[in-house]
Amino acid sequence: MSLHPAVQLLCDQSIDAIGLTTVSSVAAALGDVSVATDLIQRPEQVKALQDVLNKCMSILKNDAKNFTLRLACLECLYTLSQPPIPVFRTGLLHKTLDSMNSSVEELLVRTSPNDAESISSAREMLTVLIFRTTNYDTRVGRLLLEHTCNGNAGSMLETLLRITVHHRETCEWPLLQAALLSLYELTLPATYYATGEDSVAESKRDSAGAATDSSLQTFTLESFQARIAALLTEMREHRVLEQLLTSLRLSWCDSTCKRSPPSLAQGLADSVMLGALGRPDVAHTVTSVSTGQQMELQNWLAAFSLLCRAMDNMVEFCCEVNLVTEMRVRLLGDPGCHDWLASAAVPAVIAAIQSFVSDVDASASLSESGTGSDVVASTTDAMRCGLLATAVTLLRLLRMALYRPVVGFTKEFLSSMARLAEQVQRAERYLRHEYGGVLVMMLTVQCLVNMNGIVLTSPVNLEEAFRGLLKAILLDNTECTLSNFRIDAGRRSVAPGVRNPFEKMLVVELIVYLASQEDSPFCETNSSNESVVAYGQAVCIGERLLEEKHKLVFEENMLRMQFSLLQRLFMLQVLQSCLTVGMDVDFLSEDDVCQGRNLSAEKERPELLSEKGLHPQRGSTRSRAEPTRHPTAYVCGLTKKLMREPVVLKNGRRFEYDALQNVIGQLGHVDPISGEAIDEEIEVDIALQQEISAYRVKCALHKRGS
């Protein structure tokens, strides 16, 4: 095949003679993927390919050249990256881009209103180029964005949005996920702060021992919170969230109804789509998930998970509650976002559960036939954990969106939620054996409670689905092992030969326990919500059983400590007897002697027993289960959770605004703990709110660093 005329013309001209018409013609020609592929792969066109790359890069780097001409050269390089040929992308094209200089970045920092669209398009092309040539390295792509956008969070967000939306129909999965991963990383404190080994080394050098702040190097906590606020503001003002979710919904629908564009872009010859697995009304009929469907679903779940985690981080770290509230309202109130929840997010959860069930059944069949292997089992376990983890991530976002909704629900959304409840009910016997599975059950119930599903009977009977799920959970008397549950190790520390009461638990007990560990403020507790009352009545059995087990553990610990005390007293008597008769006592260590001397003091301080034991405190299940992980000043006196909108009464007690309002709505203006009347305005303490917001960021940073 001969060289394309436009490409031939560019090769024949000198760099100084090349004009906009020539370069534009080449860009248009290479826009045809077949032409670009021939130029890259045909041996006889290698010299022409090298010529195009060198001349386009030389013009792009030359700040004396025309602005539009330089952008046209960038477009030529971009179109050459379109064919999915990794060897070329990460080889010759990457080497060409390595020769870029600062003038290219300066070109894209221009702020002229007349060039705004051209600059945005150029940033998009260059970012895509960098992603493709670095094998989708988000660190490199993000640094480039930081420079070309001059650190402007709004411009960075806009570029990532353009990549996701504009490449929807022909986007390769790695590119879509790289853009969403970059968005997610923009919401992480660790992206801006020194963490890990650098942080540890810095902490060791800090003679004052102030490790909590030593990792904050050049990017202050306030500037990070300002960036999060800027991201949320940009999303609101330019409807970024709405555009992104609408685009993803359309792509999800494409994948469930016809050939999947992202899969085709990877060069796969066969038609790969989710099909029935992606449709909530028939997903449960898919008993065997093909490899292609599994790959497609994994890609979708990875993309949705990154987006949900990014939004969750914005909610978690933003110091301006009004911006968070606005985003929550838009998630349900905007038609595009609402449709994404109904047509993509909830169906994705259902698909993940069905794929999990299908895989469990397939593995069971392999085990029975003896054809399974340890390697396959390990891979399968990791895949199952990933399916459930993504389902949990999506459900957490859904729970947040459904917390105290200010708009109604569409029929499609109600139908999807009913299908979700039915799917979880069907899969309950599979989910109960996995930590993630029980979380899926718990979060599904909480979502239904938040939307007060018990009263929603038309146009979709959500009440029936909700009650059916609760009934399935309550009637399941199977005792589940805790080998894969993150239960406090202290609860397994029982005496040898004594059965750990937390070793096996009913499903309802597990749900009650995990619900008590939730830090999220987006769980409805107001008794004016009929679903809250119904849920409370349903799980009271589990709460009672859990309380009995806590009591049993406490009693066992008390007996163990008393036994230990008697042993040490006996040793002391033996020691005294030995000293009396003058026997050699060298076999006793100094620590044992000191321990014996302190026994009488411990005997006279019985309160030490309750301090060391698992003393069942009065109050919520959470307070009985474990002490709060957060400073008392930041924890609500009612919910025992980290506060988001703290209210400080004159008597010093601190409550979450919503929790206090619930009490006031039911009992009047009284202190929820003492019952005393309060005659003060209920207002959020802004200073304390800022402290807690900063504390959240530090917790996330140090958790990641550790």
Image (spheres, grey):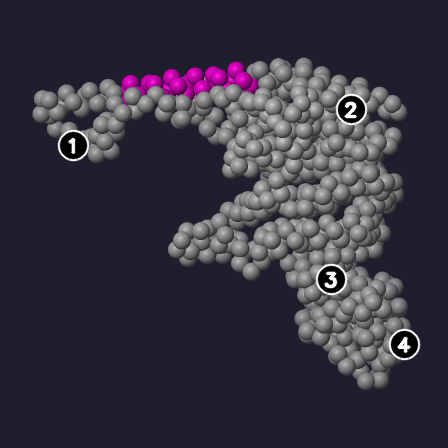
Magenta segment boundaries in residue numbering: 546-568
Nearest to N terminus: mark 4 or mark 2: 4
Give the numbered dot on residue 21: 4
- Mark 4, other Cα within 10 Å: few <14 / some 14–19 / many ≥20: few
Image position, residue 486 (x, y; %): 55, 32
Helix, strand or loop for disc 2: helix
| Label 4 SS | helix
Secondary-structure class at tag 1: loop
Q: Which residue is mark 2?
A: 453
Q: Earlier in the sequence, mark 4 or mark 1?
A: 4
Q: How many neighbours does mark 3 have within 10 angstroms: few (below 14), some (14-19), or many (20 or more)?
A: many
* Secondary structure beneath label 3: helix
Q: Is residue 50 left or right of residue 603?
A: right
- Find residue 127 and name its label: 3
- The main secondary structure of the magenta stretch is helix
Q: Which label sits in the foreground, 2 or 3?
A: 2
- Point out the residue furthest to the front here: 679
Q: Is residue 547 left or right of residue 302?
A: left
Q: Amino acid at mark 1?
A: Asp
Q: What is the tally of numbered marks visible in this picture?
A: 4
- Asked where in the image residue 648 lies, by quadrant, the reply is top right
Q: Earlier in the sequence, mark 1 or mark 2?
A: 2
Q: Earlier in the sequence, mark 2 or mark 3?
A: 3
* Circle nearer the N terminus (4, 3): 4
Viewer-side residue, 156 vs 36: 156
First-in-chain label (3 vs 1): 3
Find residue 292 and report its horizontal and vertical position in percent. 77, 42
59 to 458, vertically: above or below: below
Tag 1 residue: 586
> Residue 576, image x and y in percent?
16, 22
